[in-house]
Amino acid sequence: MPINHRPGRPIMPALLAAALLAALLLLAACQQGPDFRPAGTANGSWRPIYHEFDGITHVYVPAGCFVIGRNDGPFEETPARRVCLTEFWIGQTEVTNAQYAACVEAGECTPPMDRAQFDSPAYASHPVVFVTWEQADAYARWRGGQLPTEAQWEYAVRGTASVMYPWGDDSPTCDRVQVADCPGGVSAVGPDQRERGQTWVGALDMVGNVWEWTANWYDERHYSSFGDGGVDPVGPAEGAMRVLRGGAWGDEIERARPTYRGRHSPSFFSNTRGLRVVIVAGRNP
């Protein structure tokens, strides 16, 4: 049926109202789900759920709300805002050299910019490094997923309780996180590595070991744009730098805190930059 529109009457308010209604319906749908987690819910009341996508273990992140950012930190990490996320799955570990090699062998990814560790069998279970944002994005798409948004990444780390670190608010130790004060450099990943540092949903090494590329363009005022209770914020549509999260093996723990927002040109690569993949699917994919 055609829409009757009187000449001279602006249609934009109607479009904005429709968009607002869609957002409210989406949030209502989240809240009606059996797994929905309100902001402030104790992280310990959730038990991790695991699933393999193409043989790679992911952990389920239920729909819910949490407080992103902080009020007492650098400008770019403020202000603290309550945001809500729909459900998704995130890699239990950072993408390994062996996993990335499968994409290279399929002809869908290019090799890391430095292949020394990538080509060594001894590093097969270590995170792939020396990959640009473009390479990380290509791998995630090949896997049928995407790089996490900043909000998805931080929610998977801090949970509805919005804790300081993946494991809670206790001080970091080397059996939880691989950073500058810990022996060795980039470290192998897996369920037997730094298990005490896992997040509330069961993800490992989300701080330390290697920085993880996200989907977001960097904007220092990103959090200021959030409305209270906003759903699935995605950030600016364009920019000059992409955001990285989590810190790496060569960083002080201060830079590995979950609210720290690193950034670099999408073409940048180093031995401290890697990735993790998000799969957008329901609890029973």
Image (cartoon, rainbow, N blue to C red):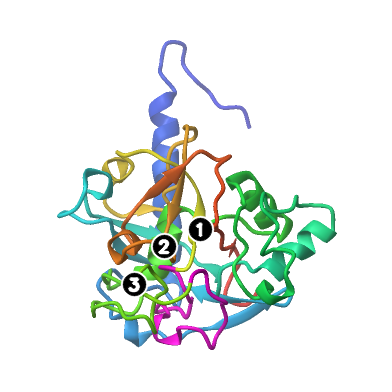
Numbered circle sitting on residue 250: 2
Query: Are the two marked residues, 1 and 2, in contact with CB atoms closer than 8 angstroms?
Result: yes
- For disc 3, the marked residue is 181
Q: Secondary structure at mark 1?
A: loop
> Is residue 265 located in the magenta-colored stretch of the structure?
no
Q: Measuring 38% from the left and 28% from the top, which residue is drawn there?
A: 13
User: Where the C terminus falls, by quadrant?
Assistant: bottom right
Q: Position of residue 215 (x, y in %)?
A: 52, 49
Furthest residue to the top? 8
Q: Amino acid at mark 2?
A: Gly
Furthest residue to the right? 106
In the image, 182 versus 276, the foreground residue is: 182
Residue 54 vs 72, above or below: the answer is below
Range covered by the magenta-colored residues:
185-208
Q: Position of residue 64 (x, y in %)?
A: 38, 68
- For disc 1, the marked residue is 272
Q: Amino acid at mark 3?
A: Asp
